[in-house]
Image (tube, grey):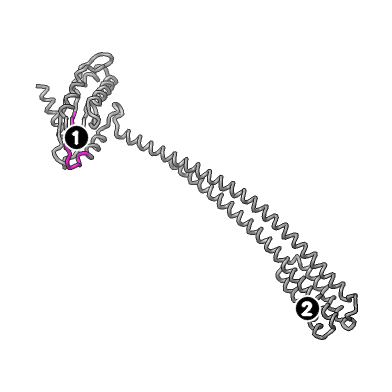
Amino acid sequence: MHRVTSLVTSMLVAVALLGLAGTTAVALTAISRANDRVTSTRALVSQFALLREALSEEAFAEAGYRRSGSDEAWQRVESAVAAMPLLIQEVRQQVPASNGIALSQLGVLNARYVRQLRATRDSMTTDADDRVAGPALDAMRSLLEATISKHRDAVTEATVQQADLTQRLSVLLSSVFALAFAVLVWVFRLDHREQRRLRHESAEHRTRALTDPLTGLPNRAALLSTMAAELGRPDTQAALLFLDLDRFKPVNDTWGHHAGDAVLQQVATRLQDAVREDDFAARLGGDEFAVFLPRGGGAEAIEARILAAFTTPFDVAGEPYDLRTSIGMARSSSAEQGPDELLRLADEALYRAKRARCR
């Protein structure tokens, strides 16, 4: 069960993180594309703006020649009109092919403009009000203005789409992040609950492993563990009382094991009432019990209280029954004395006590 829960938890975390990472990647890609579109459309406007500046240079050179009629002014005209085809070719290489028609038209118009200029050079005077080459120049200007206006509209549209996309992706990312965070919180709580359950189960298993299921007293393993911890101290003065019930077998033989179990439970209750808070009462098995006294002092008084607790008859199947116990006592003599040795000494003392009672 724990393995399945861990697997589910890991899968949920992975899905949440992958979803967040995937959404972020898609969002960044979309924003990047939107930025590229805005940048590219702005670059188109800039390229055609360069052509418009070159066109203005041609018009300015023509106007200068009309005013002066000098050879120097005509050289400026030639330089201006020669620069335009080169710039058109350069722009063609940097803009999408969809702009090819406009650039071709611009090249044709510029060539016509150049032919008209050269054909009317001698007739250009400062008094002339009409420009022979004017229509071609105006056509190029109209073409460029229309193209620039179209690309500016594209920039505006791309910018609006970019802003709308950014807003939508911000909402999406916030939602996905909130969902992923909620999943991670839920997974954390699930894992915390599972860990708490495991700790509780572990504590229960340990308790069951160290507890006698019939009487609820600690068992032999718990007694030995407690004794080992206390007897390892150099200044230990611990003592151990080993108890064995007298006349307990007839209870099982006469009234059955159910009645015997009830008597053992009564013994455990009286034993707990007779010992001190620091003393450790345990059932070793069958009708054998033990009381470990870590402080050791007052062991004789505790023994007397236990014997006194057995003077009151026990309830066996609704009838009073006189049950007694024999007790063997052993004291710890050194820190090197282990639990098994102290238990052996107490068992020998119990044997001597039972023999003394039989005399």
Q: Amino acid at mark 1?
A: Arg
Of helix, strand and loop, which one carries label 2? helix
Give the residue at x 25% y 26%. 272
Judge left or right: residue 304 versus residue 84. left
Q: Is residue 219 above or below residue 144?
A: above
Give the magenta part as a residue range. 230-242
Find residue 150 and report its horizontal and vertical position in percent: 77, 62
Mark identifier at residue 80: 2
Residue at the disc numbered 1: 295
Measure the alpha-carbon separation of dots 2 and 1. Answer: 114 Å
Which class describes the residues within 10 Å of circle 2: few (<14), some (14-19), or many (20+)?
Answer: many
**Is residue 292 in view from this perspective?**
yes
Looking at the rendered image, the quarter that the C terminus falls into is top left
Q: Nearer the viewer, residue 123 or 241?
A: 123
The x, y position of residue 10, in whole percent, is 48, 46
Q: Nearer the viewer, mark 2 or mark 1?
A: 2
**Does the rendering let one see residue 246?**
no
* Vertical side of 118 occupied by 35: above or below: above
Q: Quick one: SS at disc 1? A: loop
Number of marks present in the image shown: 2
Q: Earlier in the sequence, mark 2 or mark 1?
A: 2
Quarter of the view holding residue 64: bottom right
Counting from the top left corner in percent of width and height, residue 283 is at 24, 29
